[in-house]
Image (spheres, rainbow, N blue to C red):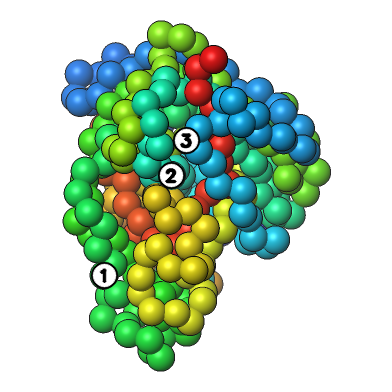
Amino acid sequence: MELPWRGCGPRGMAWAAVLGAIAMEAQDGPERALAGESAQVSMCTGLVVEIVGPRYSPDPARVVVGQRQADAGGSTSVRNVSPEHLEWKREGYFQRNRDLGQVITAPRDFTLEAIVLRTGPSEVAVRAGAPGAPVFIQFFEVEGEPQVDDSGTPPGTPASHGFSTNHRCDDVLNGVRYLPRRVVVGGTFPQLPTGCDGRGVYLRWRLDPTARPRWLAGRRYAFMVGFLEAGEGRSFTLANRNAAGIAAPPRLGDVHDAYPDGWAIRREDHGLLPPKMVPGARPPEDPTVLRELVQQAVFPSGPARFGVSPTTDGYPDVDTYRDLEFYLEAEG
């Protein structure tokens, strides 16, 4: 698909200039990201991402906690697309770059060796820019008690953003703090087939011994995965179970909750919600407005990205009632 800001003439040249400038600001290589002094989080190498295959049998001696349910459809994506390749939505915004993760409660003391995740069921489960791209995993301690905010849309009313008629689709969690503790890099996304051929594949995100966190029983923690650098077509989906579309009261831990001891999380661009929107079939021609729309869709440059707090809030999706399919493997 030809992107709407490409082409000749004054308008195409103006858009190219704006997007080129933003690309220079937004895309920093891993050397600069790891050398930044502003990130209040330790960074280390020691990540390897391995293909397990289309089947995975959790070893009860190693898997401390997991969640095996997943929807048969949907396209919940991790992505880090460069500014000049962002997808325009006619509702008036660029599709936002995103890291995805999961909150868990440790059932016992353990040292985490690996996390197994599965690619989603989408026809575009793995896009062409994903294989070989540098990835990271970030860990958090989680404090506080989650409280569901229904955004003023009780049962029987549509979600406030207008993308769904179900009231739970704009519910978010308040009362929680995500304390960043470590970012582990060094791995690359494996050489999976792209498109639908890459769906439903289990991947093991394995940590070297010096990068493994120690987690304590009864405490909440979180992990988050993403692409370290932006690029064209840099996206893959993750299998998950989402109960946001169920017409039930706004509540965690009900019969629809696949993993009552946690919830999914995301980081979108700079964390600005809701985004500025300029509805139309094409992006606006005004370079100032275009620049603002693009900037709110990409991550902050360098290590500042890892200081942007996760949330359950997104646009238009929320993770309040979502859980990834995941398995945490303890050190043997």
Looking at the rendered structure, the kind of residue marked 2 is Gln
Q: Residue at x 77, y 49 (%)?
A: 196
Q: Which mark is residue 225?
A: 3
The image position of residue 209, as x and y in percent, is 46, 9
Marks 1 and 3 sit apart, C-alpha to C-alpha, by 26 Å
| Residue underneath mark 2 | 102
Find numbered disc 3 in the image and state the secondary structure of the residue it sits on. Answer: strand
**Residues under numbered marks 1 and 3 in contact, where contact means CB atoms less than 8 Å apart:** no
The one nearer the camera, 197 or 36, is: 197
User: Is 121 situated left or right of 208 in this image?
Assistant: right
Q: Is residue 161 above or below residue 267?
A: below
Residue farthest along the bottom direction in this orientation: 156
| Residue underneath mark 1 | 149
The one nearer the camera, 36 or 203, is: 203
Could one spot residue 295 in this view of the protein?
no
The image position of residue 199, as x and y in percent, is 73, 46
Q: Is residue 198 above or below residue 161?
A: above
Marks 3 and 2 sit apart, C-alpha to C-alpha, by 9 Å
The image position of residue 165, as x and y in percent, is 47, 84
Marks 1 and 2 sit apart, C-alpha to C-alpha, by 19 Å
